[in-house]
Image (cartoon, rainbow, N blue to C red):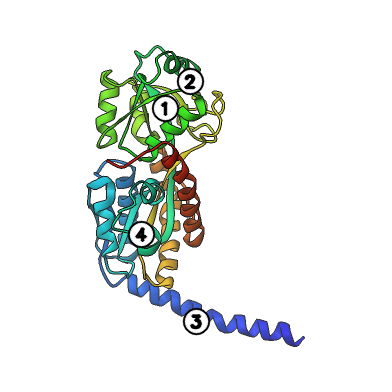
Amino acid sequence: MLIPTLLTLAAAAALPAARAQTQDAHQALAAGQFTIIAPFPPGGPVDTLARMLSNGLAAQYKQASIVDNRTGANGNIGIEAARRAKADGHTLLVVPQGNLTINPTLMPKLHYSVEGDFVPVASLARTANVIAVNPAVPAKNIAELIALAKSKPGTVSYASPGVGSSLHLAGELFGQQAGADFLHVAYKGTPQGLNDVMGGTVPMIIGNLPTLLPHIQSGKLRALAVTDAQRTPELPHVPTLAEAGVKGVALSSWYGVMAPKGTPAPVLAQLQHDIAQIFNDPASKAQLQKQGLSVWIVEGQKFGDLIRTETAAWAPIIKSRGIEAQ
């Protein structure tokens, strides 16, 4: 028939053009050094993922690739550097969800716009958050922790890596859903808060699984619950908050890659292909799983939709709780 034949011919004609675009994008990316900006210090999940991406791109394109730990201002210094970079695919930003979905509401005077200055490339990985306490705390489970907080309103404190961080907001939502009043103690990063919790100065912490897991395994922390929809394989005996009786706090932490606005679409498509190959490699998956991270790839427009959805979900919580950046 005529119409199917024409459609078939059109599709066949489009294939060489698509292949040419892919080849051009590959050649463009192979033409220079990569810089992966990680806006947080070495040693955490952002740094781990940035180095995995950097090593993978270096191997793929036989080009130098560096990780630039451009830290400070809750990640905003590194994000600013990425915003100003040339939009050719050679400078990429690895960033946690909070900088994309929380800061725009928390910090209305940001010098960057997530949608105006960046284009979403892909998410990389996700991890559970854990509610844990110093072993000396007289609460062996979430119900006992809530009862303790209700008996001493506003005195049972928890550490987070900063005002408005996703972990701070997880604590706010937990307290709201549990009907308990927990006292937030903000630190400049998770390591400082973690030290105080293990030292007994602060009784409780809400942190990412990769950061807390070694200390839970060593007995320096007692895990009470994970703030995810399901239990994590690394802590199979630790219940979810829903299983512990607190509904509506099914939260995980995730990390993604952004590129400067204006990066050509064929280059973005090539990078998405490369990212899927790098992170779905069995060795990469095994390496990340040891650190409590699960590979989780959402690409392009779908990743952008996820960012917008979570931004809209966090905004009323920030506003209703009167949370302001410090």
Counting every numbered tag in the picture gives: 4
Element under label 4? loop
CA gap, disc 2 to disc 1? 9 Å
Q: Where in the figure is residue 167, as x and y percent of width and height?
A: 38, 36
Residue at the spot 34% in from the left edge and 34% down from the top edge: 211
CA gap, disc 4 to disc 1? 32 Å
Left or right, 244 with reference to 204: right
Type of the residue with mark 2? Ile
Is residue 19 at least partly visible in the picture?
yes
Identify residue for label 3: 17
Mark 4 touching mark 2, by CB under 8 A?
no
CA gap, disc 3 to disc 1? 52 Å
Q: Where in the figure is residue 41, as x and y percent of width and height?
A: 24, 44
Identify residue for label 1: 131
Q: Where in the figure is residue 235, as x and y percent of width and height?
A: 46, 28
Element under label 2? helix
Type of the residue with mark 3? Ala
- Disc on res. 113: 4
- Disc on res. 142: 2
Label 3, residues with CA under 10 Å away: few <14, some 14-19, many ≥20: few
Type of the residue with mark 1? Ile
Task: Kindly report which numbered mark, 4 or 2, lies closer to the viewer in this rendering.
Answer: 4
Mark 2 touching mark 1, by CB under 8 A?
yes
Task: Kindly report which numbered mark, 3 or 1, lies closer to the viewer in this rendering.
Answer: 1
Q: Earlier in the sequence, mark 4 or mark 1?
A: 4
Q: Earlier in the sequence, mark 3 or mark 4?
A: 3
Task: Kindly report which numbered mark, 3 or 2, lies closer to the viewer in this rendering.
Answer: 2
Q: Earlier in the sequence, mark 2 or mark 1?
A: 1
